[in-house]
Image (tube, helix red, strand yellow):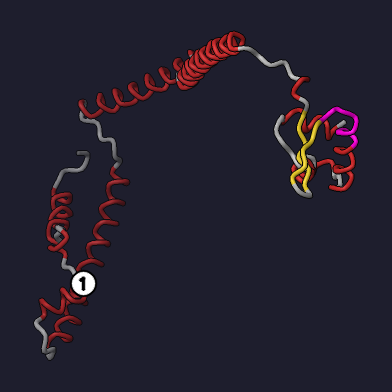
Amino acid sequence: MVVCSCSSQQNRPLNAQNVADALQKFNLKKAAIQKALDNLADGGRISFKEYGKQKIYLARQDQFNILNSEELNQMKEQNAKLQKQLEEQKKTINEVEAEIKSLQSNLTLEQICGREADLRMEVQEMENKLTKLRGGVTLVSPEERMAVETMLSEKISQWRKRKRMFKDIWDTLTENSPKDPKELREELGIEYDEDVGVSLQSYSDLIQQGKKRPRGY
């Protein structure tokens, strides 16, 4: 019987409500549990004591095998050995898992061979470029060079034009302003080319140097 099993397994004083709470998954009503407990008590399978209107039920202790001190000590020793074995097994499992993780992070022989082939190809390409440079071979065609110089020249022209437009507008704004131009510029967060370490003239000189350099170099 479920009620008897609950009382025996827990082996502690229980009232009807305690048993009902423990057996709630079986959807048993408290009244049915109370009746079952009384029947078990009448049959001598459990005992009970009355405290006022409440009955406290106890499993009969003579049904349990009570261990003596020597048997308890043996169980404690066995439990300690099992705990030690468990810790050793956990340690072994951790070591195996670490080794598996290490092996998974390493490249396979096939991957190593593939990586080596890629590196050899990269080295060969760099050696070919180096050989061409040492032999004075131009790696950039005249057409490509001209296209880059033209684009750079256009960008510098736009830079110069916008720089001049800003100067005209700024001079107009600050001409009648009561604030010092430098303070106003700091307040508005305006930065000149020189503030960020660039120079229009240096880029213009670069274009001129490129035009003077003989083609093919």
Q: Nearer the viewer, residue 71 or 132?
A: 71
Q: Residue at x 25, y 35 (%)?
A: 138
Q: Nearer the viewer, residue 78 or 117?
A: 78
**Residue 82 picture location, percent across and down:** 56, 13
Q: Secondary structure at mark 1?
A: loop
Q: Residue at x 84, y 47 (%)?
A: 30
| Image quadrant containing the C terminus | top left
Residue 27 horizontal side relative to residue 108, left or right = right
Residue designated by label 1: 189
| Image quadrant containing the N terminus | top right
**Residue 33 picture location, percent across and down:** 86, 42
Q: Residue at x 9, y 82 (%)?
A: 180
**Residue 39 picture location, percent across and down:** 90, 36
Is residue 32 at least partly visible in the picture?
yes
Q: Which residues are magenta?
A: 39-46
Is 93 placed above or below 149 here? above
Membership of 6 in magenta stretch: no
Q: Nearer the viewer, residue 184 or 104?
A: 104
Residue 50 horizontal side relative to residue 210, left or right = right
Amino acid marked by disc 1: Gly
